Image (cartoon, coloured by chain):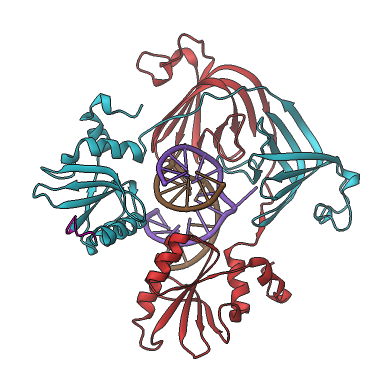
Chain colours: A cyan, B red, C brown, D purple
Amino acid sequence: MRLLIARCQVDYAGRLTAHLPMATRLILVKADGSVSIHADDRAYKPLNWMSPPCTVTVRPADTVVAPTDPAAAGLAGEPLTEVWEVKGRDGDTLLISLAEVLHDTQHDLGIDPGLQKDGVEAHLQVLLAAHPETLGPGWTLVRREYPTAIGPVDLLCRDAEGAYVAVEIKRRGEIDGVEQLTRYLDLLNRDPLLGSVRGMFAAQQIKPQARVLAGDRGIACLTVDYDVLRGTDDPTARLF
Amino acid sequence: MRLLIARCQVDYAGRLTAHLPMATRLILVKADGSVSIHADDRAYKPLNWMSPPCTVTVRPADTVVAPTDPAAAGLAGEPLTEVWEVKGRDGDTLLISLAEVLHDTQHDLGIDPGLQKDGVEAHLQVLLAAHPETLGPGWTLVRREYPTAIGPVDLLCRDAEGAYVAVEIKRRGEIDGVEQLTRYLDLLNRDPLLGSVRGMFAAQQIKPQARVLAGDRGIACLTVDYDVLRGTDDPTARLF
DNA sequence: ATATGCATCTCGCAG
DNA sequence: CTGCGAGGTGCATAT
């Protein structure tokens, strides 16, 4: 990993065109060849970047600064040291015009062992599939990821009376999740083998608007307490 | 901006729990107080991060390594130098356990002048508004951002026969865009002044599923060639 | 390979 | 402040 602190101007041309005026920024060049440019704020998003795979071509500034060169616009005579041309797989380009390099170091990090996650939607689905009685007394699971023409329903269950219920699971229940479940229900209710299929929207938190929309469409809502569900968890059913 | 290269272990607890085993990584501490941890690959996404506003508390390692401390798990006796506790506004925490600092520099970058963009959906809308005949022969524009109770329709047009057409514009046409247009059409068709309003879904690319759903609802689809449209563009209509 | 959906999404805008 | 949509979304998974 190479760390540069430099005065630079950046021009991106690809799915959009974007321009960063000359200023001091951090430039990260990683071992996979990717490049990103960071300002001194925002933890997550770089100002500009090029995802791997990409290639970096470095040229002395005087060979590229020409009247038609986009990098020449707005420089107002500030001398450049180098111009980097970063090319992505889709032909998009990042032109980094370096005026002054204040810091330049290289570091060998090795491969990262990677992130271990817990608590995402997949895990919620596993837990609810293992404990369908959480959804309603006497409920049983038909199957997880029940297939339809427009994608799988998270859970298909039967209630105590044997009627089918399609369950959509989200970490955060919002309006688009209700829309999604509605589409599934439209399809499932055309299947004569299932008969009438009800819907249930299960999430750790459900936003008021989503709850109203669900109610308007006859879809039941259930807020799930992840920690409680986890407490009833069979250790052999764990994802990790 | 502070740049650290360090052997570290990271534990996040918030909207999910996540764990990074001990390894050498880049730690970025920015002027706004935000913290991010990068591996030597991926241009865009950090392994872990804490968005501002957040606070960093640094403590000597021996004051925090206890049997119940999550940072103590898996360390197998590797000596720590410091433990950083980063707390976010929602009570989420990032625990960074530093074992060895290989590089530590500080840099003053100043505020960034910021990014200038061009070519997004707004521009497509401007271009189509200037050339409604692209949508259909003899079509005219009623107005951009035609207001409804649930938000503005991108374009309201009249076709050659004078009938109203609501146009939803996306860069990439997907299923939720069709849902959005459907909601607008439901409302517009209740307005007796407009009479029957048809729908058109215009995008640079339209996904098969979105096309099928649109067809099922009697909504026309149009794929727009941005470059061709741009070629016919009146320069005075440019956004920038 | 493409397509579909999730994300600690982030970010900006409007009500 | 919340909701909603856009993003050069990135990213993993299933097809």
Q: Residue at the spot x=81%, y=39% of the render? A: A58
Magenta residues (range): A191-196
At which x and y percent is residue A8? 77, 44
Q: Is residue B41 left or right of residue B12?
A: right
Image quadrant in which the N terminus of chain B is located: top right
Please state which of residues A101 and B109 is positioned toward the viewer in this rendering. Answer: A101
Residue A20: x %, y % from top left: 71, 51
Q: Quadrant of the C terminus of chain B?
A: bottom right
What residue occupies the far left of the structure in this picture?
A161
> Is A3 drawn above or below residue B135 in the view shown?
above
Q: Where residue A184 sits in the image (x, y, percent)?
A: 30, 57
Instruction: Give the farthest residue toward the bottom.
Output: B161
Coordinates of residue B7 in the picture (x, y in percent): 57, 19
Q: Work out whether B72 lies above or below A85.
A: above
Front-most of B39 and B133?
A: B133
Taking the image as shown, residue A145 lies to the left or right of residue B117, namely left
Residue visible at 23% across and 29% down in the picture: A233
Name the magenta segment's main secondary structure. loop
Residue at the outermost top position: B77
Q: Is residue A88 magenta?
A: no
**Residue extending furthest toward the right:** A62
The answer to whether one can see residue A116 in this image is yes
